[in-house]
Every structure is written in structure tokens, then in C-alpha cells.
Image (tube, rainbow, N blue to C red):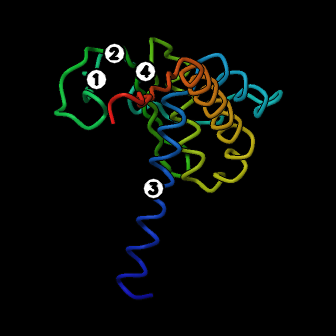
Amino acid sequence: MSNSAMQSVEDGAQASRRARLSTLARAPEAELLALWSSWLGDRADPAHEVLRPPEIGTVMVRGRAGATGAPFNLGEMTVTRAAVRLPDGAVGHGHVQGRSKRAALVAALIDALSEAGQAEALDAAILAPLRRQAEAVRSGRAARAAATKVEFFTMVRGDNA
């Protein structure tokens, strides 16, 4: 395999992981935990070593005026992060909005299991439903915003000619 082909495969894997971590980070805690429990069934969490126990902190959220202006600090947001290692050596990281230590640990486990070869099963059972829910929320928000849109027009008076 050539260097450019190998780089392309690595870029695809990195983009896939980035998308997975983004989906998990934005997922509502209740939905994430319910989907995880459903996927596990009667099984316990997979064997893992905690590399970074779940810890709560804050991050600075940046914004842009009109989505194109100069960036500015919007404010801080609470996040929780964790990292785990599976017995086969796969490492997973999880960051979630809010203060849920369990959700951060679950996100890290999903990431690690995906890196260990279970990406397709986890995508179908957990990530795809989370993406669909996020899209439904975005669509609903866009529909509510569109309902408030005002169309302005100018009428030409006949005596201004």
C-alpha cells in the first residue's frame, strides 16, 4: 500500500473516530445510558482498566457573531471526561456535556470497543439512534425558527415614476 493510500485510510479512521466522539459528547445522558443498557442486555460492562477516572471540569465555549465574525469567548460549560483500556489494549476516551461520570465512562467504553473492532455493531445500536435524535432536534429547531421568518418586500408606487 502506498504512503498516500495509507494516509487516506488513517484520515478516514480518524474522521470516523472524531464523528463518533462528537456524537457521544453531544448525546443526552438519559438516551446514551438507555441505549448502552439495551446494547449490553443482561451483561455487565466489558472488562476494562480505568486510565483516567471520570472527572468533572469546565471548558471555554467559543462563538462567532453571525457564524462568520471574529471568534469570542461565549462562556464556560461543564464537561466530564474519562479514559479506559480494554484487555486487548484498545484505549477509549469519553467527554460528555454535564456532570455525569457514568455517561463519560460509557462514552469511553464505546470508543474503546469501537477501536477494538466492534464499531459497526455499536454504530447500529447506539450511535445511529443518537444521530437520528440529534437531527430531529435540529430539524425541529429549524422549523420553529423558520416559522418566525418575515418576508420583506417593497412596493413601487405609481407616482414615483
User: Is residue 79 placed above or below 91 in the rendered structure?
Assistant: above
- Residue under circle 4? 54
Residue at x-position 42% and y-position 30%:
158
Residue 104 lies, in percent from the top left, at: 49, 24
Gap between marks 4 and 2 measured at Cα: 16 Å
Q: Quadrant of the C terminus?
A: top left
Q: Secondary structure at mark 4?
A: strand
Residue at x-position 56% and y-position 27%:
142
Which residue is more in the foreground, 88 or 58? 58
State yes or no: discs 1 and 3 in contact (Cβ < 8 Å). Answer: no
Gap between marks 4 and 1 measured at Cα: 21 Å
Q: Secondary structure at mark 1?
A: strand
Q: Point out the tag, 2 or 3, that comes first from the N-terminus.
A: 3
Q: Which mark is residue 112?
A: none
- Residue under circle 2? 77
Q: Which mark is residue 15?
A: 3
Residue 100 lies, in percent from the top left, at: 50, 14
- Residue under circle 1? 61
Kindly report which numbered mark, 1 or 3, lies closer to the viewer in this rendering.
1
Gap between marks 1 and 2 measured at Cα: 7 Å
Local packing at callout 2 (Cα closer than 10 Å; few below 14, some 14-19, many 20+) is few
Q: Point out the tag, 4 or 1, that comes first from the N-terminus.
A: 4
Q: Amino acid at mark 1?
A: Val
Q: Point out the tag, 4 or 2, that comes first from the N-terminus.
A: 4
Q: Amino acid at mark 3?
A: Ala
Gap between marks 3 and 4 measured at Cα: 25 Å
